[in-house]
Image (cartoon, helix red, strand yellow):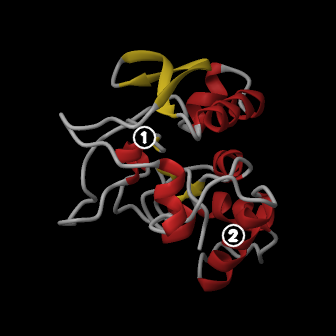
Amino acid sequence: MNRTEIIHTQERIGALGDGFWGPHSIAACQQYLKNLMPATHPFPVEGSSEFLAFFGEHGEEGVYTPPTRKITLPFTIYYDQSPIKTLRVHNKCAASLLRVFQNLATIYPDQLSRKAAGILVYNGLYNPRLKRGSLNSWSMHAWCNAIDINAGKNGNKTAWPATATMPIEVIECFAKEGWLSAGVFWGRDAMHFQATAPL
């Protein structure tokens, strides 16, 4: 983001709009998003004992696939150049992700605004793999409860919001459904949203 966009984000979350994204802005943004989440959080914390009881086992190539449901999106997104109108999502968070996209369709009512926000670029959902660099910790994508959007501008090692471009308004739509933003809660990987509660 540029300085003007960072100031806009700071003002939106109730922080000092000085264009410097430091510890105070980070804490304010995390608290702001937690306040937007449902009072009774719909999803468990990643790695908790409740997590496996809620989502079940992770997927593993050729072994097991989590139970999913197909949702029809209110607008078309694109994987490379291929149009995507439906997604398969874990049963426990499919309705929630559909509501996220319905809210995005309301906030960004036309193709031009959706393109500007970066929400037309889809980079995947289900991927039964370990976390990058891990020997035994599974990615949330292995449960089919995480989605990546606009990875080219919001990559794994790209700092949010200093360099990454994911708009706070998009992050809010996910937060209102209890989805965690990697960009806000670990400062990078702003493409990534997962159906887990914050710590």
- Asked whether 126 or 117 is in front, the reply is 126
The quadrant where residue 180 appears? bottom right
Tell me: 131 left or right of 191: left
Q: Are marks 2 and 1 in contact (CB under 8 Å)?
A: no
Which residue appears at 59% of the width and 81% of the height? 22
Which residue appears at 24% of the width and 43% of the height? 60
**Is residue 129 in view?**
yes
Which residue appears at 44% of the width and 64% of the height? 188
- Residue at the disc numbered 2: 29
Foreground tag (2 vs 1) = 1
Q: Position of residue 92 (x, y in %)?
A: 58, 40
Quadrant of the image for the C terminus? bottom right
Is 44 above or below relative to 199?
A: above
**Is residue 161 in view?**
no
- Residue at the disc numbered 1: 144
Mark 2 secondary-structure assignment: helix
Label 2: how many Cα within 10 Å (few below 14, some 14–19, many 20+): many
Quadrant of the image for the N terminus? bottom right
Which residue appears at 33% of the width and 25% of the height? 80
Label 1: how many Cα within 10 Å (few below 14, some 14–19, many 20+): many
Choose the circle earlier in sequence order: 2 or 1.
2
The quadrant where residue 74 appears? top right
In this view, which residue lies farthest toward the bottom? 23
- Asked whether 170 or 196 is in front, the reply is 196
